[in-house]
Image (tube, grey):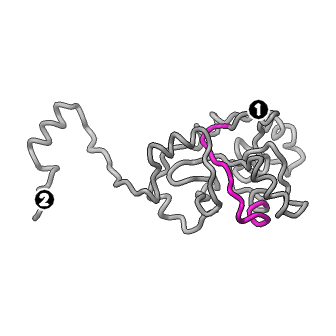
C-alpha cells in the first residue's frame, strides 16, 4: 500500500489553513531508550538514582539522562560507598552538584564505578547547608567566562561562582528536550 503525498492532500491543506498552521511541524517517534516517559520527567524534578552507564556526556560536556540535561550529585548513602572505594585525592567535597563531565566527577567515577548517583533537573534540598555548583564543571564549560586557572580573572571567576544561578544555566543549556539526532551521535556514556 502506498500512502498519498500529504503535502498535496487537499483536505489536510484546508485543515491546516483553518488552524492557521503555517509550518508543517516535526514529529519524532518515541524511543524509550532515548526519550523520557512522563513518569521519568516527574521523577527527575525530585531526583532519580541511576548508574553511571545510564548517563551521557553531550558534545558540550553537559550531562544528560535520555533526552534531558541533568545535574548530578552523590547522596549520603552513595557517599559512604565512594569513601570506601575512592582514593583520598578524588577531589569530591559535599554538598556539591555537577553539571558537566568535569575532572573531579571523572575521578569519582574511576574510584567508584559501581556507585549509583542522583540526577535531577532541580536542586536537591539543602544538606544541611545549601548546595553549591562544582567549580570544575564551570571550568570545563567555561560558563560565563569562568576561568579559575588564570590569576588575573580570579575575582571575576569568584563572582561567577558566587552568583551562579541554576535557572540561568538552564536558559543557556536547555533542560529538555535534547534532540534524538544529538543523542544518536554520541557513542559513549559518561
Q: Residue at x 79, y 58 (%)?
A: 81
Say which of 47 and 56 sits in front. 47
Q: Looking at the picture, how far across and down is residue 31, in whole percent?
A: 40, 57
Side of 120 where 183 appears, left or right: left
Give the total of numbered labels.
2
CA separation, marks 2 and 1?
A: 56 Å
Q: Residue at x 65, y 61 (%)?
A: 52
Q: Is residue 188 magenta?
A: no
Span of residues in magenta: 108-123
Q: Residue furthest bottom?
A: 187
- Kindly state the secondary structure of the residue where label 2 is placed: loop
Q: Looking at the picture, how far across and down is residue 85, in whole percent?
A: 82, 64
Q: Looking at the picture, how far across and down is residue 67, in whole percent?
A: 50, 51
For the N terminus, give its image quadrant: bottom left
Say which of 92 and 57 sits in front. 92
Residue tagged by mark 1? Answer: 163
Mark toward the start of the polypeptide (2 vs 1): 2
Say which of 53 and 9 sits in front. 53
Mark 2 vs mark 1, foreground winner is 2
Q: Residue at x 78, y 39 (%)?
A: 132
Q: Which mark is residue 124?
A: none
Q: In this view, does 106 lie above or below 12?
A: below
Q: In this view, does 78 lie above or below 132?
A: below
Crowding at mark 2 (Cα within 10 Å: few <14, some 14-19, many 20+): few
Q: Residue at x 45, y 53 (%)?
A: 35
For the C terminus, give its image quadrant: bottom right
Q: Are marks 2 and 1 in contact (CB under 8 Å)?
A: no
Residue tagged by mark 2? Answer: 3
Q: Looking at the picture, how far across and down is residue 136, in whole percent?
A: 78, 51
Amino acid at each position: 500500500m502506498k500512502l498519498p503525498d500529504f503535502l498535496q492532500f487537499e483536505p489536510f491543506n484546508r485543515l491546516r489553513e483553518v488552524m492557521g498552521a503555517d509550518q508543517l511541524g516535526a514529529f519524532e517517534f518515541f524511543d524509550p531508550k532515548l526519550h523520557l516517559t512522563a513518569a521519568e520527567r516527574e521523577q527527575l524534578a525530585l531526583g532519580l538514582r541511576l548508574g553511571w552507564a545510564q548517563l551521557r556526556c553531550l558534545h558540550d560536556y553537559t550531562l544528560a539522562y535520555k533526552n534531558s540535561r541533568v545535574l548530578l550529585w552523590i547522596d549520603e548513602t552513595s557517599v559512604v560507598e565512594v569513601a570506601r572505594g575512592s582514593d583520598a585525592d578524588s577531589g569530591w567535597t559535599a554538598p556539591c552538584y555537577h553539571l558537566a563531565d568535569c575532572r573531579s566527577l571523572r575521578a569519582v567515577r574511576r574510584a567508584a564505578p559501581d556507585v549509583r548517583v542522583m540526577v535531577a533537573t532541580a536542586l536537591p534540598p539543602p544538606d544541611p547547608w545549601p548546595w553549591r555548583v562544582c567549580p570544575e564543571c564551570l571550568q570545563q564549560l567555561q560558563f560565563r567566562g569562568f576561568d579559575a586557572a588564570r590569576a588575573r580573572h580570579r575575582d571575576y571567576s569568584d563572582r561567577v561562582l558566587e552568583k551562579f544561578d541554576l535557572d540561568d544555566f538552564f536558559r543557556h543549556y536547555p533542560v529538555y528536550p535534547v534532540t534524538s539526532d544529538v543523542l544518536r551521535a554520541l557513542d559513549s556514556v559518561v
